[in-house]
Image (cartoon, rainbow, N blue to C red):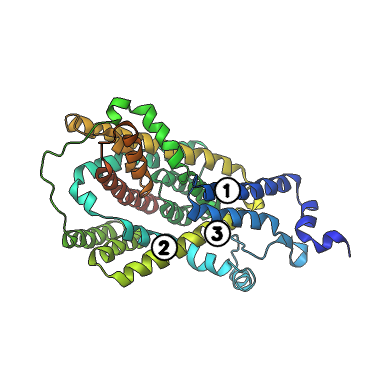
Protein backbone atom coordinates (compact mmCIF):
# COMPACT_ATOMS: atom_id res chain seq x y z
CA UNK A 1 0.00 0.00 0.00
CA UNK A 2 1.24 3.47 -0.90
CA UNK A 3 1.41 5.99 1.91
CA UNK A 4 -0.82 8.37 -0.07
CA UNK A 5 -3.48 5.67 -0.34
CA UNK A 6 -3.74 5.77 3.42
CA UNK A 7 -4.04 9.57 3.57
CA UNK A 8 -6.68 10.08 0.88
CA UNK A 9 -7.18 13.79 1.56
CA UNK A 10 -3.61 14.32 0.37
CA UNK A 11 -3.70 11.82 -2.49
CA UNK A 12 -6.78 13.50 -4.01
CA UNK A 13 -4.66 16.62 -4.45
CA UNK A 14 -2.64 14.82 -7.12
CA UNK A 15 -5.56 13.74 -9.29
CA UNK A 16 -7.54 16.97 -9.41
CA UNK A 17 -7.00 19.90 -11.73
CA UNK A 18 -4.42 22.41 -10.42
CA UNK A 19 -6.93 25.27 -10.14
CA UNK A 20 -9.22 23.15 -7.95
CA UNK A 21 -6.29 22.17 -5.71
CA UNK A 22 -5.22 25.81 -5.33
CA UNK A 23 -8.79 26.87 -4.59
CA UNK A 24 -9.09 24.10 -2.01
CA UNK A 25 -6.12 25.55 -0.14
CA UNK A 26 -7.58 29.06 -0.42
CA UNK A 27 -10.89 27.91 1.07
CA UNK A 28 -9.17 25.92 3.83
CA UNK A 29 -7.31 29.01 5.01
CA UNK A 30 -10.38 31.19 4.48
CA UNK A 31 -12.15 28.84 6.87
CA UNK A 32 -9.40 29.39 9.43
CA UNK A 33 -9.77 33.16 8.95
CA UNK A 34 -13.55 33.09 9.43
CA UNK A 35 -13.18 31.22 12.72
CA UNK A 36 -10.59 33.76 13.87
CA UNK A 37 -12.67 36.79 12.84
CA UNK A 38 -15.78 35.25 14.38
CA UNK A 39 -13.99 34.60 17.67
CA UNK A 40 -12.65 38.15 17.62
CA UNK A 41 -16.14 39.59 17.00
CA UNK A 42 -15.19 41.25 13.71
CA UNK A 43 -17.72 38.98 11.97
CA UNK A 44 -20.88 37.40 13.40
CA UNK A 45 -19.56 34.47 15.51
CA UNK A 46 -22.85 32.53 15.53
CA UNK A 47 -22.58 32.12 11.75
CA UNK A 48 -18.88 32.44 11.02
CA UNK A 49 -17.37 29.95 13.49
CA UNK A 50 -19.41 26.93 12.29
CA UNK A 51 -19.10 28.19 8.71
CA UNK A 52 -15.31 28.39 8.97
CA UNK A 53 -15.07 24.85 10.37
CA UNK A 54 -17.39 23.51 7.67
CA UNK A 55 -15.45 25.27 4.91
CA UNK A 56 -12.13 23.82 6.08
CA UNK A 57 -13.54 20.31 6.61
CA UNK A 58 -15.23 20.03 3.21
CA UNK A 59 -12.03 20.96 1.37
CA UNK A 60 -9.73 18.76 3.44
CA UNK A 61 -12.04 15.77 3.85
CA UNK A 62 -12.01 14.76 0.18
CA UNK A 63 -11.65 11.06 -0.62
CA UNK A 64 -12.18 8.46 -3.33
CA UNK A 65 -15.76 7.20 -3.48
CA UNK A 66 -17.18 4.35 -5.58
CA UNK A 67 -15.96 4.08 -9.19
CA UNK A 68 -12.92 6.11 -8.08
CA UNK A 69 -14.99 9.31 -8.06
CA UNK A 70 -13.83 12.12 -5.79
CA UNK A 71 -16.27 13.14 -3.07
CA UNK A 72 -16.80 13.42 0.68
CA UNK A 73 -18.87 11.90 3.47
CA UNK A 74 -20.39 15.22 4.55
CA UNK A 75 -22.78 16.45 1.85
CA UNK A 76 -23.53 16.43 -1.88
CA UNK A 77 -25.79 19.41 -2.72
CA UNK A 78 -25.94 18.61 -6.44
CA UNK A 79 -27.93 15.37 -6.23
CA UNK A 80 -30.97 15.28 -8.51
CA UNK A 81 -31.94 11.62 -8.77
CA UNK A 82 -34.34 10.31 -6.13
CA UNK A 83 -32.40 7.05 -5.86
CA UNK A 84 -29.11 8.89 -5.31
CA UNK A 85 -30.75 11.20 -2.80
CA UNK A 86 -32.14 8.33 -0.72
CA UNK A 87 -28.79 6.55 -0.92
CA UNK A 88 -26.66 9.50 0.16
CA UNK A 89 -29.06 10.46 2.96
CA UNK A 90 -27.81 7.24 4.55
CA UNK A 91 -24.14 7.97 3.80
CA UNK A 92 -23.45 11.71 4.13
CA UNK A 93 -24.02 12.86 7.69
CA UNK A 94 -25.40 16.33 6.84
CA UNK A 95 -27.41 15.21 3.79
CA UNK A 96 -30.67 14.68 5.75
CA UNK A 97 -30.47 18.16 7.30
CA UNK A 98 -29.74 19.75 3.94
CA UNK A 99 -32.50 17.85 2.14
CA UNK A 100 -35.16 18.25 4.81
CA UNK A 101 -34.47 21.79 6.00
CA UNK A 102 -32.48 23.70 3.35
CA UNK A 103 -33.82 22.59 0.00
CA UNK A 104 -37.42 23.34 1.04
CA UNK A 105 -36.77 26.66 2.78
CA UNK A 106 -37.57 25.38 6.29
CA UNK A 107 -34.31 26.69 7.75
CA UNK A 108 -35.12 30.19 6.44
CA UNK A 109 -38.58 30.04 8.03
CA UNK A 110 -37.19 28.91 11.39
CA UNK A 111 -34.75 31.84 11.41
CA UNK A 112 -37.58 34.18 10.40
CA UNK A 113 -39.70 32.90 13.29
CA UNK A 114 -36.82 33.70 15.63
CA UNK A 115 -36.48 37.18 14.13
CA UNK A 116 -40.19 37.72 14.81
CA UNK A 117 -39.67 36.78 18.46
CA UNK A 118 -36.85 39.33 18.71
CA UNK A 119 -38.69 42.19 16.97
CA UNK A 120 -40.83 44.73 18.81
CA UNK A 121 -43.33 45.77 16.14
CA UNK A 122 -44.27 48.69 18.39
CA UNK A 123 -41.41 50.72 16.93
CA UNK A 124 -43.07 50.47 13.50
CA UNK A 125 -46.51 51.34 14.86
CA UNK A 126 -45.09 54.33 16.73
CA UNK A 127 -43.56 55.82 13.55
CA UNK A 128 -45.35 54.11 10.63
CA UNK A 129 -44.79 56.76 7.95
CA UNK A 130 -41.12 57.27 8.78
CA UNK A 131 -40.44 53.54 9.05
CA UNK A 132 -42.15 52.66 5.77
CA UNK A 133 -40.65 55.56 3.80
CA UNK A 134 -37.10 54.77 4.86
CA UNK A 135 -37.60 51.03 4.33
CA UNK A 136 -38.83 51.62 0.78
CA UNK A 137 -35.86 53.83 -0.09
CA UNK A 138 -33.54 51.18 1.39
CA UNK A 139 -34.77 48.71 -1.24
CA UNK A 140 -32.74 50.59 -3.86
CA UNK A 141 -30.23 47.76 -4.11
CA UNK A 142 -32.86 45.03 -4.48
CA UNK A 143 -34.41 46.90 -7.41
CA UNK A 144 -31.49 48.52 -9.26
CA UNK A 145 -29.20 45.48 -9.07
CA UNK A 146 -31.64 43.36 -11.09
CA UNK A 147 -31.19 45.12 -14.48
CA UNK A 148 -27.43 45.37 -13.86
CA UNK A 149 -27.27 41.62 -13.22
CA UNK A 150 -29.22 41.01 -16.41
CA UNK A 151 -26.74 43.13 -18.37
CA UNK A 152 -23.94 41.00 -16.88
CA UNK A 153 -25.52 37.90 -18.40
CA UNK A 154 -27.39 36.35 -15.47
CA UNK A 155 -30.76 34.67 -15.98
CA UNK A 156 -33.94 36.35 -14.71
CA UNK A 157 -34.09 34.14 -11.63
CA UNK A 158 -30.41 34.47 -10.73
CA UNK A 159 -30.52 38.24 -11.24
CA UNK A 160 -33.51 38.56 -8.91
CA UNK A 161 -32.01 36.23 -6.28
CA UNK A 162 -28.70 38.09 -6.11
CA UNK A 163 -30.59 41.40 -5.98
CA UNK A 164 -32.31 40.30 -2.77
CA UNK A 165 -28.89 40.45 -1.08
CA UNK A 166 -29.52 44.20 -1.06
CA UNK A 167 -32.21 43.64 1.54
CA UNK A 168 -29.49 42.36 3.92
CA UNK A 169 -31.77 39.57 5.11
CA UNK A 170 -30.06 36.17 4.94
CA UNK A 171 -33.16 33.93 5.24
CA UNK A 172 -34.82 35.93 2.47
CA UNK A 173 -31.85 35.31 0.18
CA UNK A 174 -31.98 31.59 0.95
CA UNK A 175 -35.70 31.48 0.17
CA UNK A 176 -35.40 33.55 -3.02
CA UNK A 177 -32.44 31.63 -4.44
CA UNK A 178 -34.11 28.25 -3.79
CA UNK A 179 -37.23 29.41 -5.61
CA UNK A 180 -35.65 31.41 -8.44
CA UNK A 181 -32.14 30.07 -9.05
CA UNK A 182 -31.58 26.71 -7.33
CA UNK A 183 -28.54 26.10 -9.56
CA UNK A 184 -26.87 29.12 -7.91
CA UNK A 185 -28.29 28.59 -4.43
CA UNK A 186 -24.91 27.65 -2.96
CA UNK A 187 -22.79 30.61 -4.18
CA UNK A 188 -25.57 33.20 -3.74
CA UNK A 189 -26.19 32.09 -0.14
CA UNK A 190 -22.48 32.09 0.69
CA UNK A 191 -21.95 35.53 -0.86
CA UNK A 192 -24.96 36.88 1.03
CA UNK A 193 -23.85 35.70 4.47
CA UNK A 194 -20.24 36.72 3.97
CA UNK A 195 -21.35 40.23 3.03
CA UNK A 196 -24.03 40.56 5.70
CA UNK A 197 -21.38 40.07 8.34
CA UNK A 198 -19.47 42.97 6.81
CA UNK A 199 -22.30 45.51 7.16
CA UNK A 200 -20.92 46.37 10.60
CA UNK A 201 -17.63 47.31 9.00
CA UNK A 202 -18.80 48.91 5.76
CA UNK A 203 -21.90 50.92 6.58
CA UNK A 204 -20.21 53.33 9.03
CA UNK A 205 -18.07 54.52 6.11
CA UNK A 206 -21.19 55.12 4.01
CA UNK A 207 -22.67 57.18 6.85
CA UNK A 208 -19.53 59.29 7.17
CA UNK A 209 -19.27 59.71 3.40
CA UNK A 210 -22.82 60.89 2.78
CA UNK A 211 -23.86 62.56 6.06
CA UNK A 212 -21.91 65.58 7.41
CA UNK A 213 -20.84 65.48 11.05
CA UNK A 214 -23.22 68.28 12.09
CA UNK A 215 -26.20 66.30 10.76
CA UNK A 216 -25.04 63.07 12.39
CA UNK A 217 -25.33 64.74 15.79
CA UNK A 218 -28.94 65.94 15.41
CA UNK A 219 -31.20 65.28 18.40
CA UNK A 220 -34.73 64.39 17.26
CA UNK A 221 -37.35 66.35 19.22
CA UNK A 222 -40.71 64.58 19.52
CA UNK A 223 -43.32 67.34 19.47
CA UNK A 224 -46.27 65.00 19.96
CA UNK A 225 -46.74 62.96 23.15
CA UNK A 226 -45.76 59.35 22.62
CA UNK A 227 -48.59 56.83 22.47
CA UNK A 228 -47.84 53.68 24.43
CA UNK A 229 -48.41 50.85 21.95
CA UNK A 230 -50.06 47.98 23.81
CA UNK A 231 -49.42 44.27 23.28
CA UNK A 232 -53.02 43.90 22.06
CA UNK A 233 -52.45 46.50 19.34
CA UNK A 234 -49.24 44.78 18.25
CA UNK A 235 -51.00 41.41 18.18
CA UNK A 236 -53.90 42.79 16.13
CA UNK A 237 -51.44 44.32 13.67
CA UNK A 238 -49.53 41.03 13.33
CA UNK A 239 -52.71 39.03 12.66
CA UNK A 240 -54.09 41.47 10.09
CA UNK A 241 -50.76 42.13 8.35
CA UNK A 242 -50.08 38.40 8.07
CA UNK A 243 -53.51 37.72 6.54
CA UNK A 244 -53.27 40.61 4.05
CA UNK A 245 -49.73 39.86 2.93
CA UNK A 246 -50.42 36.12 2.56
CA UNK A 247 -53.52 37.02 0.49
CA UNK A 248 -51.58 39.38 -1.78
CA UNK A 249 -48.36 37.36 -2.04
CA UNK A 250 -49.10 33.66 -1.37
CA UNK A 251 -45.72 32.59 -2.81
CA UNK A 252 -44.05 34.12 0.27
CA UNK A 253 -46.71 32.96 2.75
CA UNK A 254 -44.21 30.70 4.62
CA UNK A 255 -42.02 33.74 5.36
CA UNK A 256 -44.89 36.00 6.40
CA UNK A 257 -46.42 33.28 8.57
CA UNK A 258 -43.10 32.55 10.30
CA UNK A 259 -42.30 36.21 10.95
CA UNK A 260 -45.70 37.31 12.20
CA UNK A 261 -46.35 34.22 14.33
CA UNK A 262 -43.05 35.00 16.07
CA UNK A 263 -44.32 38.52 16.77
CA UNK A 264 -47.69 37.17 17.94
CA UNK A 265 -46.08 34.72 20.36
CA UNK A 266 -43.86 37.49 21.74
CA UNK A 267 -46.83 39.80 22.31
CA UNK A 268 -49.01 37.03 23.73
CA UNK A 269 -46.35 36.42 26.36
CA UNK A 270 -46.36 32.63 25.95
CA UNK A 271 -43.07 32.10 27.76
CA UNK A 272 -42.71 28.40 26.90
CA UNK A 273 -43.07 29.11 23.16
CA UNK A 274 -40.77 32.12 23.41
CA UNK A 275 -38.04 29.98 24.99
CA UNK A 276 -38.65 27.18 22.48
CA UNK A 277 -38.29 29.47 19.46
CA UNK A 278 -35.60 31.84 20.75
CA UNK A 279 -33.39 29.33 22.58
CA UNK A 280 -34.32 26.28 20.50
CA UNK A 281 -35.37 26.95 16.91
CA UNK A 282 -33.34 30.12 16.35
CA UNK A 283 -30.04 28.80 17.68
CA UNK A 284 -30.54 25.39 16.07
CA UNK A 285 -31.26 27.06 12.72
CA UNK A 286 -28.41 29.57 13.07
CA UNK A 287 -25.85 26.91 13.97
CA UNK A 288 -26.77 24.57 11.13
CA UNK A 289 -27.10 27.52 8.77
CA UNK A 290 -23.49 28.48 9.42
CA UNK A 291 -22.24 24.88 9.31
CA UNK A 292 -24.17 24.11 6.15
CA UNK A 293 -22.96 27.22 4.36
CA UNK A 294 -19.42 26.17 5.24
CA UNK A 295 -19.72 22.62 3.92
CA UNK A 296 -21.32 23.92 0.75
CA UNK A 297 -18.07 25.79 0.02
CA UNK A 298 -16.52 22.92 -1.89
CA UNK A 299 -13.80 24.14 -4.27
CA UNK A 300 -15.18 22.22 -7.25
CA UNK A 301 -18.65 23.71 -6.66
CA UNK A 302 -17.53 27.32 -6.26
CA UNK A 303 -14.91 27.34 -9.03
CA UNK A 304 -17.37 28.89 -11.45
CA UNK A 305 -16.95 32.18 -13.38
CA UNK A 306 -20.45 33.20 -12.27
CA UNK A 307 -19.28 33.37 -8.65
CA UNK A 308 -17.15 36.44 -9.38
CA UNK A 309 -20.19 38.19 -10.85
CA UNK A 310 -22.21 37.27 -7.76
CA UNK A 311 -19.49 38.69 -5.50
CA UNK A 312 -19.56 42.01 -7.36
CA UNK A 313 -23.36 42.16 -7.56
CA UNK A 314 -23.84 41.26 -3.90
CA UNK A 315 -21.53 44.07 -2.80
CA UNK A 316 -23.22 46.49 -5.21
CA UNK A 317 -26.70 45.55 -3.94
CA UNK A 318 -25.76 46.14 -0.29
CA UNK A 319 -24.00 49.43 -1.10
CA UNK A 320 -26.94 50.74 -3.13
CA UNK A 321 -29.42 49.77 -0.42
CA UNK A 322 -27.35 51.58 2.19
CA UNK A 323 -27.21 54.69 -0.02
CA UNK A 324 -30.95 54.40 -0.71
CA UNK A 325 -31.68 54.23 3.01
CA UNK A 326 -29.60 57.35 3.63
CA UNK A 327 -31.51 59.14 0.85
CA UNK A 328 -34.72 58.10 2.63
CA UNK A 329 -33.31 59.57 5.85
CA UNK A 330 -32.69 62.87 4.06
CA UNK A 331 -36.25 62.83 2.65
CA UNK A 332 -37.70 62.53 6.18
CA UNK A 333 -35.21 65.18 7.35
CA UNK A 334 -36.68 67.63 4.79
CA UNK A 335 -40.33 66.64 5.39
CA UNK A 336 -39.95 67.14 9.15
CA UNK A 337 -38.32 70.54 8.78
CA UNK A 338 -34.81 69.34 9.69
CA UNK A 339 -36.09 67.76 12.93
CA UNK A 340 -34.73 64.34 12.03
CA UNK A 341 -31.39 62.58 11.97
CA UNK A 342 -30.72 61.18 8.46
CA UNK A 343 -28.43 58.49 9.92
CA UNK A 344 -31.63 56.59 10.76
CA UNK A 345 -31.86 55.87 7.01
CA UNK A 346 -29.12 53.21 7.07
CA UNK A 347 -31.29 51.14 9.43
CA UNK A 348 -33.84 50.69 6.65
CA UNK A 349 -31.55 47.95 5.35
CA UNK A 350 -33.14 45.06 7.21
CA UNK A 351 -30.20 43.33 8.89
CA UNK A 352 -32.06 43.18 12.22
CA UNK A 353 -30.86 44.65 14.56
CA UNK A 354 -27.32 45.17 13.23
CA UNK A 355 -27.92 48.22 11.02
CA UNK A 356 -30.01 49.90 13.75
CA UNK A 357 -27.10 49.42 16.17
CA UNK A 358 -24.67 50.78 13.57
CA UNK A 359 -26.83 53.90 13.18
CA UNK A 360 -27.03 54.54 16.94
CA UNK A 361 -23.31 53.92 17.42
CA UNK A 362 -22.32 56.38 14.68
CA UNK A 363 -24.65 59.06 16.06
CA UNK A 364 -23.31 58.73 19.59
CA UNK A 365 -19.75 59.11 18.36
CA UNK A 366 -20.74 62.68 17.45
CA UNK A 367 -23.34 63.48 20.11
CA UNK A 368 -23.88 61.36 23.23
CA UNK A 369 -27.25 63.05 23.80
CA UNK A 370 -28.71 61.90 20.47
CA UNK A 371 -30.83 58.76 20.80
CA UNK A 372 -32.30 57.47 17.53
CA UNK A 373 -32.61 53.75 18.25
CA UNK A 374 -36.42 53.71 18.42
CA UNK A 375 -36.69 55.27 14.95
CA UNK A 376 -33.89 53.04 13.64
CA UNK A 377 -35.54 49.85 14.91
CA UNK A 378 -38.84 50.91 13.34
CA UNK A 379 -37.15 51.31 9.95
CA UNK A 380 -35.18 48.10 10.54
CA UNK A 381 -38.23 45.94 11.23
CA UNK A 382 -40.19 47.57 8.41
CA UNK A 383 -37.27 46.73 6.12
CA UNK A 384 -37.84 43.03 6.85
CA UNK A 385 -41.42 43.35 5.65
CA UNK A 386 -40.60 45.37 2.50
CA UNK A 387 -37.82 42.95 1.52
CA UNK A 388 -40.23 40.03 1.93
CA UNK A 389 -42.75 41.83 -0.30
CA UNK A 390 -40.16 42.49 -3.03
CA UNK A 391 -39.01 38.87 -2.79
CA UNK A 392 -42.63 37.78 -3.26
CA UNK A 393 -43.01 40.08 -6.29
CA UNK A 394 -39.87 38.70 -7.92
CA UNK A 395 -40.97 35.10 -7.33
CA UNK A 396 -44.51 35.77 -8.57
CA UNK A 397 -43.30 37.43 -11.77
CA UNK A 398 -40.36 35.18 -12.61
CA UNK A 399 -41.08 31.68 -11.30
Question: Badge 2, how many Cα within 10 Å: few under 14, some, many 20+?
Answer: many
Tell me which label, 2 or 3, sits earlier in the chain.
2
Q: Is label 2 in a helix, a strand or a loop?
A: helix
- Which residue is found at the position 39% from the left and 42% from the top? 142
Q: Is residue 213 above or below residue 373?
A: above
Tell me which label, 1 or 2, sits earlier in the chain.
1
Q: Can residue 103 be seen?
A: no
Front in this rendered view, residue 189 or 198? 198
Report the side of 20 relative to 259 (left or right).
right
Q: Is label 1 in a helix, a strand or a loop?
A: helix
Q: Which mark is residue 154?
A: none
> Real-space Cα distance between discs 1 and 3?
15 Å
Q: Which mark is residue 36?
A: 1
Tell me which label, 1 or 3, sits earlier in the chain.
1
Q: Is label 3 in a helix, a strand or a loop?
A: helix
| Pointer 3 residue | 291
Label tally: 3
| Pointer 2 residue | 282
Q: Can residue 390 be seen?
A: yes
Amino acid sequence: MKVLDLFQGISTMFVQEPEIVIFRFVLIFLGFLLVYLGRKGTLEPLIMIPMGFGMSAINTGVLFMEDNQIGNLIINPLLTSTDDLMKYMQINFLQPIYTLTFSNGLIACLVFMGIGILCDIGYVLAHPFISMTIALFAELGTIVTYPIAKLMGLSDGAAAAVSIIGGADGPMVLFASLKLAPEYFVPISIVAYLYLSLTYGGYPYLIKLFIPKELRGIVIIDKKPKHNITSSEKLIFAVIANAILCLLFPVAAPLFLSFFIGIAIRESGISKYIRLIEDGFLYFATFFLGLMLGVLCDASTLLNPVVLKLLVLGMLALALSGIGGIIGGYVIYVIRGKNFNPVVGIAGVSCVPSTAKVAQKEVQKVNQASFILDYALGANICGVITTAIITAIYITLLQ
